[in-house]
Amino acid sequence: MADTEFSEFHDELRSVATELLAKNSAVDWGVLADAGWTGLEVPEALGGAGATFAETAVILEQIGQAAGATGYLGGAALAVGVLNTLPPGDIRDELLGAVAAGSPRLAVVSGGFGLDGERVHGSAEFVPDAVGADRLLVLVDGAVAVVAAAQLTVTAQPVVDETRRLAAVSADSVRADAVLPWEAAARIRHRAEVSVACDSLGISTRMLTATVDYVAMRHQFGRPIGSFQAVKHACADMLVAVEMSRRLVTDAVEAVAAGAEAGVPAAMAKSYACSAAVDVAGKAMQLHGGIGYTWESGIHTYLKRATLNRSLFGSIAAQRQRIAQKYSKGI
């Protein structure tokens, strides 16, 4: 996403992702695995590409641009993030290789669960991509419990955004297949926040492009509506929001990819980019006029997705409070 020594590779990855998602935004999991996306951050020795979160972020942004229903967030971006924070071992390596191969599918359950020996109990809501997963990585205090999905109660939760698959997950003292020591909860929380911010950046970028194209083509009173001052100002505001989001998201992605402290960059990216995406999609709907409110325009899909992103993994208010607490310590 930034201008780095890998910018050429990122451009190629972006181009391939755009082409694949243009064919069908609801991409089958097997197609993602065949494209190598699920194994981007999996070590080469285990069948992956040995890349970093910077490359995963490119895919996340493109999925956001396409409003893609892919399962990539929970099944790859978060699952691989958790596994890569575990020490090497047979179970961890087996699971990483499975993600790269595309089977079995994983999902991550964070919060709401406890551990009693080798048995997990508790419940969590709005778990990304748990429906259809074969095994769940249940994050508990100081450990990751690997649990077969069949052992848990996984119930789909309808949300405003139909491109996302969220679920409620519960368990009443079920035995885990494995319990692995783990102390990286904050890193995974920040990765999740930045992942959603990448998606929202993609939404904003797509809505800006679609709107600029439309106002240049749509004529009123004998000239393009894009020539009207009010429309120009609205598009300029959208552009500023997109560029600000890109700068903040880029900084957060770099922090996550480098394994650096990402608390503040993640909160900044999540709070601004996710809020901006709602505003940009709303402006896109307005500037498209009456057609923007129709089902055929598709803008409602992006607005709903942006609205859900704003709430996932911590509200905007919660993120800004974290930033305020960080900087108030220096006053």
Image (cartoon, grey):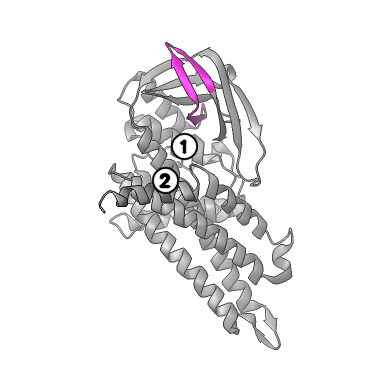
Write the residue at 32% across / 21% down: 89
Q: Is residue 121 left or right of residue 299?
A: left
Disc ID at residue 313: none
Residue at image point 67% right, 38% down: 158
Q: Which residue is mark 2?
A: 56
**Magenta segment main secondary structure:** strand
Crowdedness near tag 1: few (<14), some (14–19) or many (≥20) residues, C-alpha within 10 Å = many
Whether residue 249 can be seen here? yes
Q: Residue 267, position in %: x, y? A: 40, 49
Image quarter hosting the C terminus:
bottom left
Residue range corresponding to the magenta coloring: 102-122
Classify residue 91 as left or right of residue 157.
Answer: left
Residue at the spot 40% in from the left edge and 42% down from the top edge: 191
What's the residue at 40%, 17% (across, down)?
179
- For marks 2 and 1 on the same chain, the one whose residue lies earlier in the sequence: 2
Disc 1, SS? helix
Instruction: Identify the element where label 2 is drawn.
Output: helix
Task: Give the image location of residue 192, x and y in percent.
Answer: 44, 41
Q: Measuring from the top left, give residue 197's x and y in whole percent.
A: 46, 51
Q: Residue furthest front?
A: 331
Crowd around label 2: few <14 · some 14–19 · many ≥20 (10 Å): many
Q: Is residue 3 magenta?
A: no
The residue tagged 1 is 76
**Marks 1 and 2: in contact by CB < 8 Å?**
yes
- Disc 2 marks a residue whose amino acid type is Thr
Along the line of sight, the residue nearer the viewer: 169 or 92: 169
